[in-house]
Structure formats: structure tokens, C-alpha cells
Image: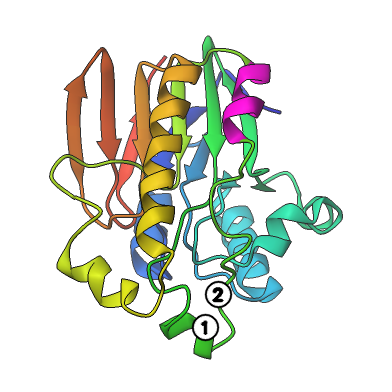
Amino acid sequence: MHTIPSNHNLYLMGDYHQGFIELIYNLEAMPPNTSLIILGDYDAYEAKDLVDLATIAEKHQVVMYLMRGNHDNPKYWQDRKFSEQLKNAWFNLLEDIDLIVYRDLKLIAVSGAVSVDRTCLRFDNGHCWPKEEGIPKDSVQQIKKLGKCDILLTHTGIIDGITVKNHFIDTYASTDENLINDIQEERRVIEKLQITSGCTKHYFGHFHQSWSADKFGVKYKCLGICEIQKVSS
């Protein structure tokens, strides 16, 4: 659990993907006393990638909270001894399912996603973790224990019009027989997380585009790469 000081401004940011220039621009535009939750995908394959981000956070005096994306080595988030060593006043690795309190708001963060290229491109470079990179299997049960929240943060989500069965996914599914079923199951889990959490707002990244919708009493927002969103209480 993390408590963000009530005198802080709270922002969310979409996938990082080594967007160094965009990140610095965002940080320099932020007011003093700011906390920033990044929704994942730093392309953090080695510990050095995270150390560099911790250095940037301290230099710009912005408190960063990093969710894990599907392009990030899970061991750095799931090894709590490592994450505690890396933690400082300006930098935190969120657990795969974590609770954040900000003023009168309760936020629940759920990391991870299925990678369409999990047995292809990144596997050749040793940058793929098919067994660990997805949403935790017990995420719905864990959210039940945490109780209702105001805002749900996930790395992946559901965008109207983007179907599981499409040419892009089919390209990878030809060499990954379980891919379609795993993505369909992931969507079912996302829907359960929304219902179980009772959230009225849901933010996610993963799709590299800016999209929003309002339905069934929930405001949905997908943040594009390095896109910023201010959180208001």
C-alpha cells in the first residue's frame, strides 16, 4: 500500500517505451510536489534500466510509481527484496496488485498483460517472459480482499472496436496456438476486475493510442505513449 501526500498533484502517464524526450518534457512541465504513476512498458530488461529512471525521478523531484508492463522483466517487480533496495524517496516499483490512497480516493493497480509477440520477436533477444508477464491469475480474488475502489489502473484494457480476432494478432497466433485463448481470457479478467473493484474510472495503456469512453457508469481512458492525465479528487 502507498499513500500519496494530500498536498501533491497526482498524474498518470501511459507506456514509456524509452520515450526519454517526452518523459523529460512532461516532468519539467509538472508543478512542485508531484507524484506520477506510469502504467508500464519501460522496456526494462535489466536493472540498469530502472536505476536510470530512479535517477531521473530524483533529478526532477517527482515521485514515481512504476506499474509493470508486458515488456518489462517481471523479476524486478516480483522480487520484493530488489524493489525495496531500489526504492527511495522519489522512486517505487508497485507490486503486481497494489493499493494507492490519494486524498479521498482509493486506487488499485493491476500490472501485466499478454504479449502477442511472446514466442516470436522478443524471445530471440531473451526479452520475453510468457509465464510471468500476464495479469496475475489471482487478481480478482486479491481485489476482493482489497475492497471497492474509485479508480482502477491496469496495464492493459479493452477498447471498443479492437477485437481479439484481427490480422495483427493472427500473424502471431500462427506460431502461438494458445495466444487467442489467452487474450480472450485476459479480457474476461479485465471485465471481472472492473465489476469487482466497483470503480467509476478505469485507466490503462498498452494499446499505444489515446481513447476514451463512458458506459455503464464507468469512465474509460486509454493513455497513449507518454500521454499525461491529471487525477482529481
The colour scheme of the drawn protein is rainbow
Give the residue pinned by disc 2.
Answer: 128
Would residue 37 be counted in the magenta stretch? no
1 or 2: tag closer to the N-terminus: 1
Q: Which residues are magenta?
A: 139-146
Quadrant including the C terminus? top left
Residue extending furthest toward the front? 177
Give neighbour class at mark 1: few <14, some 14-19, many 20+ (Cα, 10 Å).
Answer: few
Viewer-closest of 113 and 166: 166
Label 1: element kind: helix
Q: Are marks 1 and 2 in contact (CB under 8 Å)?
A: yes
**Nearest the eye: 53 or 99:** 99
Locate residue 116, reporting x and y percent.
Answer: 38, 67
- Looking at the picture, how far across and down is residue 197, in whole percent? 49, 19
Quick check: is 141 in the magenta stretch?
yes
Read off the residue under disc 1. 123
Q: Residue 40, relative to residue 104: is it above or below? A: below
- SS category of the residue bearing label 2: loop
The location of residue 142, given as percent across then percent down, is 66, 28
Vertical relation: 206 (above or below) 71: above
- Kindly identify the residue that appears in the image at 65 percent across and 61 percent down: 74
**Mark 1 residue type:** Phe
